[in-house]
Amino acid sequence: MKQIFLVEDDTAIAKNLTRLLRTEGFAVTLASTQAEAFTLLDGKRFDLALIDISLPDGNGFTVCTEIKETQKIPVIFLTATGDEASVVTGLNMGADDYVTKPFRPRELIARIKAALRKSGQSSAAFELCGLYVDTAGGIVRKDGKEVFLSALEYRLLLVFISNPSNVITRDRLLNELWDAAGEFVTNNTLTVYIKRLREKIEDDPANPEIILTVRGTGYRLGAEHA
């Protein structure tokens, strides 16, 4: 799983970005200040950084410089609309790309995947019980045959893939799908999506091995994950 370093001081933006990235199969580490970013960089390795240019105790340019000197990973700046001078400064300092706020989620994910591919850090494939998922290409195969999932079925699958060791509650799944769909997802709807997904990826949907039910809590991924 690829590690994204998010440096963003706006609580609402940080929350929404974290949720979006996790549903796309990324792990996210958040820093809300320049100082916090430096502390985290000192002890952890990342695959890509998303950095807000404006921070309460400094700016993202200094964070970018530190990253480029120590980790050699792609950096994408999050910048305010029309701030051309900041964009030019960021690119001159070694940033790989920039995305203007407010941004479209699909565009941001596309930019992230492009930067990872360019740097040779594209997401690794996931395999379990004959299921193969290429998160970079958005391809799903079962026993070698391509499986066609709806957008929400795919996002649901990505939630499990990005949390291979965790029990995921129904409430969390509801929140993830609601955010992804832009519409209210009920408990009954979630049950239907789980059923449909199992019918497409399980050898025996009545006795699932990939998406397991944890009675009274939620679901978890099968144990023999790659």
Image: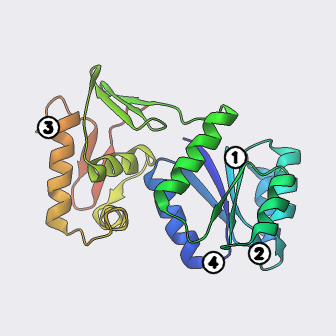
- At x 58%, y 70%, the residue is 14
* Closer mark to the observer between disc 1 and disc 4: 4
Q: Nearer the viewer, residue 131 or 138?
A: 138
**Distance of mark 2 from mark 1, alpha carbons?**
20 Å
Alpha carbon of mark 1 to alpha carbon of mark 4: how far? 21 Å
> Label 2's element?
strand
- Residue denoted by label 4: 10
In the picture, the disc for residue 55 is: 2
- Amino acid type at mark 2: Leu
- C-alpha span from label 4 to label 2: 9 Å
Question: Badge 1, how many Cα within 10 Å: few under 14, some, many 20+?
Answer: some
Q: Which residue is mark 3?
A: 205
The residue identified by callout 1 is 46
Question: Does residue 161 lie above or below 133 as drawn?
Answer: below
Q: Is disc 3 in contact with disc 1, using a CB cutoff of under 8 Å? A: no
Residue shown at the point (36%, 36%) measured from the top left: 223
Q: In the rendered image, which quarter is residue 171 located in? A: bottom left
Q: What is the three-letter code of the residue carrying label 3?
A: Pro
Q: Residue 213, image x and y in percent?
A: 23, 49
Residue 93 left/right relative to 148:
right
Q: Residue at x 13, y 32 (%)?
A: 204
User: What kind of element bears circle 3?
Assistant: loop
